[in-house]
Image (cartoon, rainbow, N blue to C red):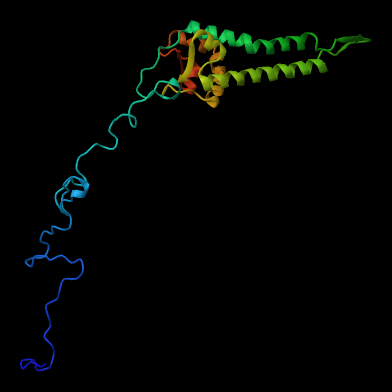
Amino acid sequence: MSYPNNPYGQQPQQPQQPGYGYQPQPAPGQGAPQPAYGAPQPAYGAPQPGYGAPQQPYGAPQQPYGAPQSGYGAPQPPYGGQPGYGAPMPAYADWGHRAGAYLIDALMFALPAVILQVLAGSIGTEKVVCTTSTTVRCTGGGYSGLGMFLLLLAFVAGIGGMAFLAHREGTTGQTPGKKILGIRTIRESDGQLLGFGTAFGRKLAHIADALPCYVGFLWPLWDAKKQTFADKIVGSIVVKA
């Protein structure tokens, strides 16, 4: 069948039907509200704002990330029971307790080395033999093989004892003497333990305490922080445990 008004013989097209799943949309204006997308859905049980509707902005104030809350971020006691940053330092240990702890440690670890040195000098020396002809000539008098061995043991005992005390003081804050008298050694800057290296250096720094007539060992008697010269060198303090 032909139509007189169609010169090319084309069939007039029928209005397009909406495709499968297509929802009719209002003609006026692009971006008109679409009830199908983002509308309140009863499946979740509560109305939800539509797509693009005002909602909580991305950067709106909310619970800050680092705000204190239970668990994460809450103040906790420092590891090992050491005073944390900002915590008050314990009271300084008096000179009497420090001297008493030093004597206890010396009796336990330095005395064996001293005894070995005495033995090396008494039974580990060669006898002096003097001969006379025209002149007096004496030989011997030095350390024998036994004496040299005893001196070596004394050296090992002294270094080993100092290393053990440094290890205990650096890792626990207390030598056996300090533990008995209830004091400990910590860093002045933050109240933490010295560590083995600093504690061993502190032992060596006691040479500075002994050089000026042992006045460095007496310095805590009038020092505000009750420090010896060795304490000032490595930045340590001795406090009550």
- From the viewer's perspective, tell me whether residue 2 is left or right of residue 159: left
- From the viewer's perspective, tell me whether residue 47 is left or right of residue 226: left
Residue at x 34% of width, y 30% of height? 71
Q: Residue 120, image x and y in percent?
A: 76, 12
Q: Residue 62, image x and y in percent?
A: 22, 38
In the figure, residue 60 lies in which quadrant? top left
Q: Is residue 4 above or below residue 181?
A: below
Nearer to me, 221 or 73: 73
Residue at x 18% of width, y 67% of height? 22
In the figure, residue 74 lies in which quadrant? top left
Q: Is residue 179 above or below residue 36?
A: above
- From the viewer's perspective, tell me whether residue 234 is left or right of residue 42: right
Residue 81 visible at all: yes
Residue 143 visible at all: no
Q: Residue 141, image x and y in percent?
A: 82, 12
Q: Is residue 88 above or below residue 7?
A: above
Q: Residue 175, image x and y in percent?
A: 55, 15
